[in-house]
Image (tube, rainbow, N blue to C red):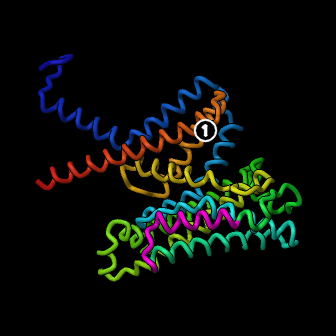
Amino acid sequence: MKENGITYDGSQRDSLQNKIRVFLMKYLIVVIFFVMVVVFSIVSPSFLRVSNLRSIMVQTSMLSIVAFGMTLVMIGGGVDLSIGSIAGLATIFGVTMMVYSGLPAILGILLGLLIGGLVGFFNGLLVSRFNVAPFVATLSTMFIAQGLQFAIRHGESIGYGFPAAYISMGSGRGGFLSIPTPIWIFIAVLAIMLFITEFTTYGRYVRAIGLNQYASKYSGVRVRLLTLSTYAIAGVLAALSGLILGASQSYIQPYIGDSFLLDSLVVALLGKAAFAGYASILGTVFGALFLKSLETGMAMLGAPGMILNISKGVLLLAVLLLSIVQRQSLSVRRVAHEQ
């Protein structure tokens, strides 16, 4: 068959169509992201203003940090439903110690991180030592942490008396080199998590556990210890995100970190779908940028909150379905290659 003087046969067309199909299967989420940005930019020209982009990056930074913990747990084959409650508990406890016990900001922050790590350690203990299913273990911890949030302040909010050093932790107006402090914290955590997951034996072992826990165990990998560590790290990162969020709002209330649960799940799965089923730290950053761009764009268009929540639910469902299709497609290609 000739088109524009060039001869094509059926096999060439099939090959081209197959390549396009594979490309879209791998990078559909990325394509959707760029289309979304273009649409928002056309409908609302202020979407690409520097001030708006800075706001998106600050929000992306806070969400990415907590989602890194979720991603690490997922790489190891688990899930953590308690990270939102851990973030809230750690924030309320740390800030209460600063405001009402007179502790310096740095000590209050460290105590908040310690609480997050201890609750995460408890999750890891339930999963690794007592063989409780991750879903059940972390769901139970979520309810416990929610109750403790109310117990600390009897349900009262904290809206004054914050140390200046703590407030600067969440400042979005500009820090060193006029870059907001949350972004600097995000860059530091990103570098650490990238190094741990991609360039260390620890990261390779955690991924091996996620792929096949029993094979890893019989290969000499300390499955229990490594699994426990992923939940402890997730707890610390959840606490860090909660503390940054509290500092940025200058107002602490019970359930302050609850939105982190759904959002971190969505962005971790978005990143996994964008990277063709490969859970990764960079994929999670992309997922957080996708979600926060979507939220900001819809807010600028005046969409009500319920529409945004519906969009998140639809997005999560779409990502899960895409992940299933990607996994099936990968299996088919692997079988075809082996044959």
Magenta: main secondary structure = helix
Residue beneath label 1, please? 295
Residue at the spot 63% in from the left edge and 64% down from the top edge = 86
Looking at the rendering, which quadrant does residue 119 occupy? bottom right
Q: Is residue 9 left or right of residue 202?
A: left
Residue at the spot 57% in from the left edge and 71% down from the top edge = 120
In the picture shown, does residue 320 fall above or below 190? above
Image coordinates for residue 87, horizontal then vertical, percent: 65, 61
Q: Is residue 121 magenta?
A: no
In the picture shown, does residue 231 fall above or below 70? below
Q: Quadrant of the N terminus?
A: top left
Residue at the spot 51% in from the left edge and 77% down from the top edge = 125
Region rendered in magenta: 130-148
Q: Is residue 242 left or right of residue 17?
A: right
Image coordinates for residue 287, horizontal then vertical, percent: 51, 47
Q: Is residue 311 visible?
A: yes
Q: Secondary structure at mark 1?
A: helix
Q: Is residue 48 visible?
A: no
Image coordinates for residue 210, horizontal then vertical, percent: 38, 66
Looking at the rendering, which quadrant does residue 117 occupy? bottom right
The kind of residue tagged 1 is Glu
- Looking at this view, is 171 or 114 the one in front? 114
